[in-house]
């Protein structure tokens, strides 16, 4: 049986084979291998393979299926971050809103993290249980962004009696001022969660919310705790004052009486109806400036500004004004025995 075009053959003296596609002289055939190359081979070295299937010429071979080409869309460019001058200082807050204000006594709460700065923040939000900390949320928060962290029920409020926020601030693909990584521990007054009037108008939500500062103007919040050492010093100071009162002493010329100014908004205004927190703070600071201007020429005059402990907003604002606009004046915490931590004493220089 002679070899003809289209026969499938294998090589007798070597590995391989293919399909006969033509003749090269009287004693050679052209064999196309599986890679598509035509190999001249002696006819005597080819053995026809009879597989019972029709022989198919290479030009008529079924073509392999065309693979679907997936065109990948280019990744969208990251949204350009709009920076502000004030955003170069870190201002970080935690905020809590009732899930259903209309059912305030039964509803749970939503917890939000607010990053009011030009920096990305890698954060870890956690609470203390026994002698350990348990993370409730962690991740990266984009600049000038508020994010939802969790929803929890009233029964979990006891877990918020001691919370902590850890963070690292950075910018992407641009130079930035180095900010210290920090762990800020807070002890929110959980009683406020049960009082609807404690949820107030704010700059971050259309709804009323409880807002707790974590960092303001790059300065982390500190717990206002009275140490045993401070209590002992205050008691010793009082004891000394009592002993002095019982002794005969030669009195010097009395110094100018200490001026007390109560900056509580209820003492300054009969009504705060229609005023935002910002309006009230501005009014309190205007009163602060007015008093300092009144006594500007009286060197040595001591003025006690009573601002209360609260969340420390007014206290921090007063200290900022003293550091920037009244650098020559001396200021300190007023007498702990008389005012606790709720007053600042300024001495005119």
Image: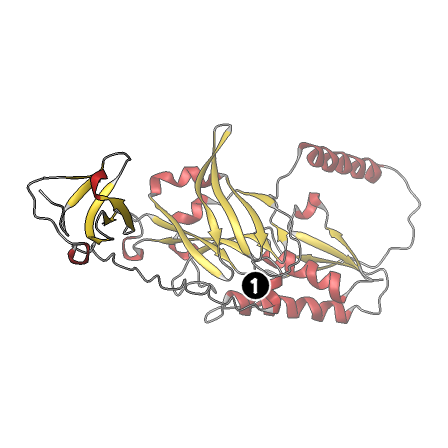
Measured from the top left, where is residue 183 in percent x and y?
Answer: 58, 42
Judge left or right: residue 65 versus residue 99.
Answer: left
Q: Which residue is at 43% across, 37% downward?
A: 159
35 is higher (above) or lower (below) than 84: above
Residue drawn at (70%, 43%) of the image: 337
- In the rendered image of this protein, does residue 41 appear above or below residue 62? above
Residue appearing at x 13%, y 39% in the figure:
49
Q: Residues within 10 Å of mark 1 (few under 14, many from 20)?
A: some
Q: In the picture, residue 238 is in which quadrant?
A: top right
What element does badge 1 sit on? helix
The residue closer to the viewer here, 341 or 1, is 1
Q: Position of residue 335 (x, y in %)?
A: 73, 47
Where, by quadrant of the figure, is residue 1 drawn? top left
Quadrant of residue 295 within the rendered picture:
bottom right
Circle 1 is placed at which residue position? 265
For residue 261, say whether it is visible: no
Task: Classify the position of the C terminus by image quarter.
Answer: bottom right
């Amino acid at each position: 049986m002679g070899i003809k075009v289209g026969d499938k053959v294998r090589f007798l003296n070597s590995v391989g084979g293919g399909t006969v596609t033509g003749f090269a002289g009287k004693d050679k055939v052209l064999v196309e291998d599986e890679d598509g190359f035509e190999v001249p081979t002696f006819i005597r070295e080819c053995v026809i393979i009879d597989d019972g299937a029709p022989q198919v010429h290479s030009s008529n071979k079924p073509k392999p299926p065309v693979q679907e080409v997936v065109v990948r869309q280019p990744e969208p460019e990251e949204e350009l971050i709009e920076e502000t001058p004030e955003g170069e200082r870190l201002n970080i807050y935690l905020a809590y809103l009732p899930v259903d204000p209309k059912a305030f006594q039964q509803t749970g709460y939503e917890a939000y993290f607010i990053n009011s700065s030009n920096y990305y923040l890698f954060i870890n939000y956690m609470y203390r249980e026994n002698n350990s900390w348990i993370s409730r949320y962690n991740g990266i928060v984009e600049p000038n962004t508020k994010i939802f962290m969790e929803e929890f029920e009233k029964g979990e409020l006891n877990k918020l009696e001691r919370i902590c926020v850890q963070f690292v601030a950075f910018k992407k693909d641009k130079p930035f001022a180095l900010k210290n990584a920090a762990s800020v521990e807070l002890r929110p007054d959980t009683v406020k969660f049960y009082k609807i009037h404690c949820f107030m108008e704010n700059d971050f939500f259309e709804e009323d919310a409880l807002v707790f500062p974590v960092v303001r103007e790059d300065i982390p919040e500190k717990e206002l705790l009275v140490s045993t050492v401070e209590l002992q010093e205050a008691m010793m100071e009082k004891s000394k004052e009592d002993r002095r009162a019982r002794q005969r002493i030669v009195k010097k010329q009395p110094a100018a009486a200490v001026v007390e100014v109560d900056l509580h908004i209820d003492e300054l205004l009969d009504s705060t109806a229609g005023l935002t927190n910002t309006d009230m703070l501005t009014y309190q600071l205007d009163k602060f400036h007015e008093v300092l201007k009144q006594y500007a020429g009286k060197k040595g005059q001591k003025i006690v500004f009573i601002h209360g402990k609260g969340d420390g907003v007014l206290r921090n604002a007063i200290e900022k004004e003293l550091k920037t606009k009244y650098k020559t004046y001396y200021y300190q915490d007023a007498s702990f025995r008389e005012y606790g931590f709720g007053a600042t004493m300024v001495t005119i220089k």
